[in-house]
Image (cartoon, grey):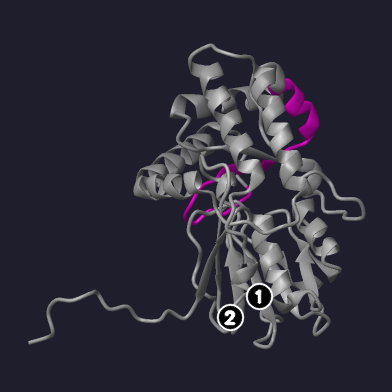
Amino acid sequence: MRRVGGEMEAKRGEAFSYMTDSGRSSLRLILRSGLKSKRFLVPDFLCKVILDVLDEAGVSYSFYGIKDDLSIDKKTISGGKFDVFYSINYFGQRNKIPAQVTGDKIVIEDYAFSPLLPERPSGVKRWVTFNSLRKISPLADGSLLRSSFELSGGLVKKQEPPFSKLKYDAKEIKYKYLFEHKFSENRYLALFKKAEGLLDRQKEIYGISGRSLFGLLDFYANLDREYSIRRRNFEALRDCLKRDSINAVKDYHSFFVLTVDKRDELREYLFSKKTFLPVHWPRIEGLENGLYDRAISIPVDSRYSRGDMAGVARLINGFYK
């Protein structure tokens, strides 16, 4: 008979785990844990914040190509001219690490658009991954980070990030504006802008706020329901739109992403119909990837119904008639 009772045992996992206030703080933690002197290979379709953080740390980097379907252009990966391969999970699409990224390379998987972090890719020895919870949940801050090697966790400040409270204030005012007809739209937009300014100026690494930590528990408790609604909304768009999503989502549907002609004109038209679709990401000077000018994203989270998705599809289809 096996031993019964006492405290539960726990096996030491293969990965080290950390929590920060944002994806950019997680990237700073990685860089400040001995990677600043490494040569990075990064995709040519990415958020400028990534390059800002690399530049801030004085990191040397070059680019590889991302195709129109968000897959990696393997022909653009140079042999041994890099130490760290930076891969992005594009809106739920995880690309396979190319064979050119041999076992002595470090791999960073940016999982900004997923609530759950992946397992280490087969054949990769040194690996780290992180997400950005504020991009795919109601949380104002938070990032989970997992690494196959130990990072300098002592760099993470115990205080709550200064921008978080402002974000939550803005979120509450937006809720009251939408559902209780209080305040004005400009009130919460100004707070969001101020909070983003604080985040942009922040160079320290903070931990997740207490409010977001408890919000995260609620979010995960309802994650199966969230998955189901997002999948339903994604499929509704696929059924109603006269064009397909370009991202091959396997699990968590964060956005329905498509490429269109006259993208900016479409956005202006949708603005006039009170439909505000995000662009990922604004063009970065010097990078020629056409996705910067043609990609547009439709959120599919649980705020929306199949009817909402059908309405957005009608507007887009109507614009291109």
Image quarter where the N terminus lies is bottom left
User: From the viewer's perspective, is residue 264 above or below residue 234?
Assistant: above
> Which badge, 1 or 2, comes first in the chain's sequence?
1
Q: Nearer the viewer, mark 1 or mark 2?
A: 2
Are there few (<14), some (14-19), or many (20+) residues within 10 Å of tag 2? some
Q: Which residue does the numbered mark 1 point to in the structure image?
A: 107
x and y, in percent, of residue 319 in the image: 70, 23
User: From the viewer's perspective, is residue 1 above or below residue 93?
Assistant: below
Determine the residue located farthest toward the top in the rendered image.
Answer: 181
Residue 244 seen by the camera: no
Q: Quadrant of residue 166?
A: top right
x and y, in percent, of residue 247 in the image: 60, 51
Q: Quadrant of residue 215?
A: top left
User: From the viewer's perspective, is residue 196 above or below residue 264?
Assistant: below
Residue 20 seen by the camera: yes
Determine the residue located farthest toward the front in the rendered image.
Answer: 159
SS type, badge 2: loop
Residue closer to the observer: 294 or 112: 112
Q: As shown in the figure, which amino acid type bears the numbered disc 2?
A: Phe
Q: What is the span of residues highlighted in magenta in the rendered image?
A: 246-270
Q: CA distance from mark 1 to mark 2?
A: 12 Å
Q: Is residue 212 magenta?
A: no
Residue drawn at 35 percent across, 48 percent down: 221
Q: Which residue does the numbered mark 2 point to in the structure image?
A: 149
